[in-house]
Amino acid sequence: MVAIKTVTCSCNPDSRRGFDNIKGETDIWKIGEMPAEVDENSGLAKAKEEGYYWTHNDSGGKPELYKINSKGKLDSVLVIEGAKNVDWEDLAEDDKGNLYIGDFGNNGQNRRDLTIYKRTPEGKLDKIRFSYADQEDFPSSKPEFDCEAFFWYDHNLYLFTKSWAKKKQSTRMYKVSDQPGVYELSPVETFKLDTKVTAADISPDKTKFALLTYGKLYLFSIEHGVISFDKPLACLKTGRKQTEGMIFDDNQTIIFTNEQGKIYSFRF
């Protein structure tokens, strides 16, 4: 049984869903621009050094991570030996310093090589391979098996799909172990919405998570350690063209980027 939740969110000051200081687009500040090496950025994750972040290019880019500061200045390039960038879409990190690279972009709905690379702080690279248990044909007649968003929590990775349906769009949440292996994933929940999910992250204190879409950012509360759509908190109208990467910089600050190379921040 897949639970289906619906959140009505106009993203205006009269429906902030509990966050009085989320006011709209005027609260979003441009803080930087991506370096020339990152011409189509898609994911963000925190680097070990304070104030630095990892990012990468989208499909067809080099298998490299780029360390930048919040203004977008390039610090260094990390080549991921043994990996291939088929369609890298998002980054995540765990509490032990492992980085996860989501090579699960699937615009054509026909991939059978969906992979999450797990890179340890020592440089070891492992693979988490998976398929969707509810995908019946390749390419799928239902355009609902693309994915551009995930985060790590409590030894698991939570994936959120990007629907290409013209009407009645939704995102499906899947859960997979952070251990290397081959997995078949069944959906945990489905969340109806009117736009495409492009990034996800969890707050450092693990009390909330966020989904970035084209035009909006949704916030959900985490209660009793359960990742669920049951507790919607707020949404923020973001605009800013093709917003693709997002992280919690701290418990009250979110940084997000777009494919046009701009870096933005806001506090709530």
Image (spheres, grey):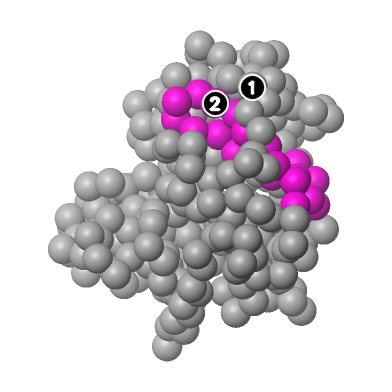
- Main SS, magenta region, reads strand
Residue found 43% across the figure and 36% down from its top:
241
Is 96 in front, or is 238?
A: 238
Give the residue pinned by disc 2: 262
The residue at 57%/74% (across/down) is: 229
Specify whether residue 22 is in view.
yes
Q: Position of residue 238 (x, y in %)?
A: 54, 46
Residue corresponding to mark 1: 32
Q: For numbered disc 2, what is the local secondary structure?
A: strand
Q: Is residue 252 magenta?
A: yes
Judging from the image, what secondary structure is the residue with disc 1 in?
strand
Q: Position of residue 115 (x, y in %)?
A: 44, 47
Magenta range is 249-268
Q: Is residue 93 magenta?
A: no
| Alpha carbon distance from label 1 to label 2 | 6 Å
Residue 170 rendering spot, x and y as whole percentages: 38, 67
For residue 129, side relative to residue 49 (left or right): left
What number of labels is visible?
A: 2
Work out whether mark 1 precedes mark 2 in sequence or the reverse, and give the earlier one: 1
Q: Residues within 10 Å of mark 1 (few under 14, many from 20)?
A: some
**Are the residues flagged by discs 1 and 2 in contact, CB closer than 8 Å?**
yes
Residue 223 against residue 164 in the figure, above or below:
below
Residue at image position (80%, 46%) is 250
